[in-house]
Amino acid sequence: MNMLKQAGNVNGNFVKQPESGYFGVIVQIYEIQTPEEAQKMVSLGVDHIGSVLTGAESRSKLKETIALVGDSGARSSLIPLFEDMDRISAALDEYRPDIVHFCQSVFDASEDWAARCGRLISMQATVKERFPEISVMRTIAVPPPGPADHLPIMEVARHFELLTDFFLIDTFLMEGDTAAGQPEAGFVGITGQTCDWRVAGQLVEQSSIPVILAGGLSPDNVFDAVRKVRPAGVDSCTLTNAVDETGAYVRFKKDPDKVARFVEQARLAGREVESSKVQDER
């Protein structure tokens, strides 16, 4: 593993990324489960290439995928869709990703959110102790506009920040003031819906670690997202997927043209933000 691959970004202040050699936002794409798709993402200029541990994937293909990403100079990110610490340790020992990405929900569990955060922070501390070379990404749930005002989002982020290397803001579905069913029960993400960018921007301003914006980002809205929120990076899953004959998104299958446009628009926005910052400083 390349130990020189560090975040390098502070939110809204785009600096050179050692692994990609450009000035701009990090581009992260999920869910890449095969070496063939990983190679395509590398060729399109994706910086963080994310995979998911569901229990149904081919272990050999996933190992090959993560190894290919590491050899390419991009960074691999791995989401375990389970919470057992022994299983997580075994997975990290086997796959050795650059980043482990935790996206458990803290707002729709049966326990108090603070107690839930405490257990998850303990999990991250264990990972840091056992695998100091692996960065930790933590999803911070932000609902669409409206419900976000009722949740202690900034306080949750402060709880996690000390033991986290990246935050990822993703959309948390709600019905009124209560949690709705998430696509992956107990986890945040793959909704295809945007979150409250106003709250996302507040979190970017508050955080001392890089914040990646996710949630319903596509080639058509990522430019505006970068300009308005000014995150250190952007992430896409659902809306860069391929579609079937009915127009439904196909999970675990990317549309290379959509990814290419997403990367292009993110880069353009990053350059515009950086240019405006330079002008402001004159």
Image (tube, rainbow, N blue to C red):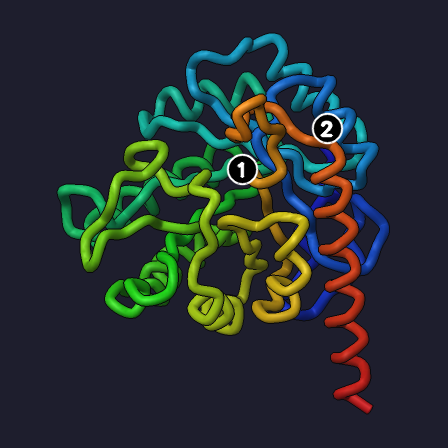
Judging from the image, what secondary structure is the residue with disc 2 in?
Answer: helix
**Residue 183 in view:** yes
Residue found 75% across the figure and 79% down from its top: 277
Question: Vertically, is 110 above or below 80?
Answer: below
Residue 273: % across, % down: 73, 71
- Residues at marks 1 and 2, CA–CA distance in whole angstroms: 21 Å
- Name the spot of residue 154 as percent of width and height, x first: 36, 66
Q: Residue at x 43, y 42 (%)?
A: 191
Amino acid type shown at disc 2: Val
Instruction: Give the left or right position of residue 281, taking residue 236 as reference.
Output: right
- Label 2: which residue? 69
Rendered location of residue 168, percent (x, y): 50, 51
* 10 Å crowding of disc 2: few (<14), some (14-19), many (20+): many
Q: Could you say where residue 34 lies in the image, as x and y percent from the top left?
A: 65, 17
- Sequence-wise, which precedes: disc 1 or disc 2? 2
Taking the image as shown, residue 117 lies to the left or right of residue 273, namely left
- Quarter of the image with the C terminus is bottom right
Q: Is residue 115 left or right of residue 278?
A: left
